[in-house]
Structure formats: structure tokens, C-alpha cells
Image (spheres, grey):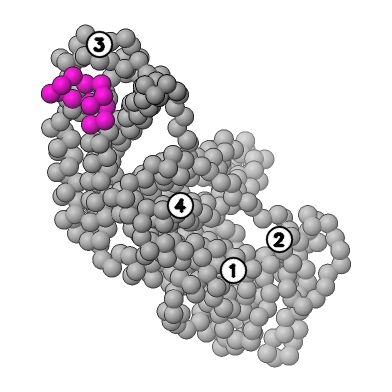
Amino acid sequence: MRWSCVRVARKWAGAASRRAGSALPGRADLVQVERPAGRTTWTRSARSGGLRCATGTRSRPRHPRVAEGPGRVAPAAGGHPRVVGPEALPAGGRFIGAARLAAGRVTGSPPISYACHHPVMDHQLDRLGVQLSEARRLTRHGGVPRNRLALLLLDNAAETLLRLSATTYLARADLYGNMMRRLEPARPHADEAEKLAQELGLRVVSASRRRKIDRDFNELVDFVFEHDDWSLDPEMAACIKILHRYRNAAYHRDKVYPDVLEPAVIIYFYLVAHLLKHRKSSLWLIDQAPPGVLEVLDGDDLGSGFLGLPGYSSEAFQAAMADRILRDFIPDSTRVSESLSKHMLARLDGIDRDLKEIGDYHGPPDVERDFAIRVVQCTDAEWHADGPPRDFWTRRFAVTGEVIQAWKADALKLAGVTRALDALRMFAEQESSIVKFEERASELAFETEGAIQFESDLRRGK
């Protein structure tokens, strides 16, 4: 038999991570608010560093990191959003309209004329809308090059939405940390203070874990999905990780197959739509839809404004975009099941192709496939040895030809699952059982291609 001694340097690209920026500390500027009764109230409207509060007034030059006073700002990230009047204007907000709220309609306070606009939220929704609209356009045109670009856009949208939600949860953790520090002087003297400090400590995120969340995609997914008030199911977390890993192969190694790529894009549309709909953030009011949002909606009616105000909530825009994406690509749950089944079957076909290449080049006649299945499960040292291990043909390996056939049968069953969450759970379980074998087979097939090319070059005198 022929045993390979090919040594090909391999570098597997890691998951790309992008750092999410954070707002600089702001300062508070006085804003004049006119109430219907003719009285004038002076309140403070905070603005974050680098963002000017468009209130129609000019403020004197100051250092951007110096706060003039405590002021009144938007609710802390993760808190319950409320409409309470101009005091709740977010950082960078401005007055935009004249909407009258009847007295007591929302909070029982005197009626106030205002709506709130946030430039940062505008830009975020605009960018997300353009990405999703372009991904939809590319997918509709079809083909490997366009579907590959659509996959990259969707993966970036998923990571962006996860990081925005993580920023909200991290801000909440900072709040708990500040509360715990305030309790430090009382801890040695009061049992209740000690108990409360310990409870708060469980909700604080350490600096080391923050670095992991910032650098590792899987850590980011785990952090967002571990919160009790995060409404998406863990099955989605597992599938997001799977598709992100597949995206890495498509982006870093240009490893794409048409039968694998197309269903992967459909599945990612489904997951991104749910991330968009359930994103954690404070509630902002926006006077008009950003252009990117309108591109996604493609003529859909936005409905009435938020609580009678001349504007819409950021959540309404996100939900509208998510619903349009689902209507375009996932009209019912069976489309999710069918796409998952096609994706898994296509990946199993890819394993077959890799096994054939390994067996045809390295294996003895008539047992090429069995040889390839066994050699894929050998250690790296055994693969690079001068000959096969002595128990190569008698060793009991976890994966056999029968096991691969069972994988294919399970993948076919996926198409008949009626509930999307059940299909996602089954898909994640199946994927976890094949992924190590799949990656190793792909790795050895890549080395085999290198060996074939090397011999071809030698014959041609290169």
C-alpha cells in the first residue's frame, strides 16, 4: 500500500472579531421646554462625546469629557424604556415635532409637545438595512459568487446585532458593579449588605471575560444567549455558531460549494431576522425611516406612529425589517427544515468527495473508501509516519461507512420536521457529530491535492 509522507503547512483562519466602539462620556446642556399652559421649564439634555445635541442652540466650547452637571438622561442600557417627557431625551437627541399627548395618557403628567430623534440609531438602522437589502438582491440573482457575498453580509449583520445587544448587557453589568462598589464600606458591618454584594457580584462581567467576548465570536454568542431576559432559544445560538464557522471557510479559504452555500444563506436570513426582532436596546423615537430601512421594506406600509407621536420607535423599524425578510425567504417553518436538510446533505456529499480523493491517491485497490475513512481518524503523527499503524485494519474507529449512511438518513428526516426550533435543534446535534470528521477529511484532502500537484510538477520538470 502507499502511505503519504506529504508535509504541507496548514493555517486555519480563526473567527474574525470586530471591536464594538462605545460612546464617550457626555455632558448636559440646558434645554428650554415649552409646556401647553405657557410655563417654561429648564431641563438638561445630555449628549455623548462627539455628538452635538441639535436643540437649535449653541453651547460654549468645552472639553468633551467634562460634564457640566448630573442632568437627566435616557434610561440606563437594559432598563425599562419610558416616555416621560424631555428629560428622557437620549444622548444626541433633538426636538423634532409637535405631537400633543393628552394629560395622563402615558404617565399622568401634564401634556408635552415633543418627539425624540437619535442620529446614532438612524445610522445603525440605515447600515443594517442596506446590508440586508443587498444580501437579498444578491441571493435573488443567485450563483456562487453572489451567494458567497450575501453570506458575508448576513454574518456581519448577525455579529453586529449580537454586539449591540452585548453592549446593552455589559452596560447593565457596569451598573451592578457600581452598586457593588457602593456597598463595600457596609459589607463588614451588615449581613444584608454582604449578601446583596455577593448577588450583585454574580452579575458583574470581569475584564478577562470582556476581552473574550470582544475577540471570540462563540464567547459573544454565549454571553448574549445566557441572559434570562433574552427571548431566543439556545438552538439558534448553536446554529449561528455553525454558520459563522462555515462563513470563515467561505471567506478565508474560499471554500464554497453551490449545494451547501445556497441553503446556508436562507438559514442565515432566518436567524438574522430573529436577532433583529429581539435585539436588546433602549427605545428611541425616530421621525422618519432611514433609507436603508425603506430599501428592505420595499414599499411596505409602516403603519401609525408610536403612541400618537409623529415618529416611529426603533423597535418598530427592526420588527418591520425582520418580518419582511421572513416573508421573502421563510414563508413558513417548512422552508427552514428543508434548507437545513439540503445544507446537511450537501456537506455530507462534500465528505464523500474528500474521501474519494484521499482513497484514490493513497488507498489500495478495491478498499479505497474504507481506507480513507480509517486514515481520516488516525492521529497526525500516524498520518505523517513512514507507514500505517500495525492495527490500522483491525482498530475500531468511531466513524464507519454505516455511520455515514446513518448521517445521511438523519439529514433526510430533517426536511419533514414541522417546527423550526425542532429542526434547528436536530441540525445542531447532527452537525456536532460530523464536524470533526468533516474538518479532518477536508484537511487531508487538501494535503492530497498538494501531493498530486507536486508530483505533476516533477513530471513536467518544474
Q: Mark 2 points at which residue?
A: 48
- Inspect the magenta stretch and tell me whether residue 361 lies in it: yes
Residue 48: x percent and y percent? Answer: 71, 60
Residue 152 circle label: 4
Task: Give the magenta part as a residue range.
Answer: 356-368
Residue 122 circle label: 1
Amino acid type of the residue tagged 4 in the rendering:
Leu
Q: Earlier in the sequence, mark 4 or mark 2?
A: 2
Q: Give SS at disc 4.
A: helix
Q: Mark 3 points at which residue?
A: 389
The quarter of the image holding the N terminus is top left
Q: Give SS at disc 3.
A: loop
- What residue is rendered at 21% in x and 8% in y? 390
How far apart in space, not on screen, are marks 3 and 1 (Cα)? 63 Å
**Are the residues tagged 2 and 1 within 8 Å (C-beta)?**
no
Q: Earlier in the sequence, mark 2 or mark 3?
A: 2
The quarter of the image holding the C terminus is top left
Q: Nearer the viewer, mark 3 or mark 1?
A: 3
Residue 281: x percent and y percent? Answer: 53, 61
Amino acid type of the residue tagged 3 in the rendering:
Pro
**Among the 4 quarters of the image, the one containing residue 377:** top left
How far apart in space, not on screen, are marks 4 and 2 (Cα)? 32 Å
Residue 266: x percent and y percent? Answer: 33, 58
User: Which residue is the extreme one toward the bottom?
Assistant: 37
- What residue is rendered at 72% in x and 63% in y? 51
Q: Which of marks 2 and 3 is in front?
A: 3
Q: Earlier in the sequence, mark 3 or mark 4?
A: 4
Q: Earlier in the sequence, mark 4 or mark 1?
A: 1
- What residue is rendered at 70% in x and 91% in y? 37
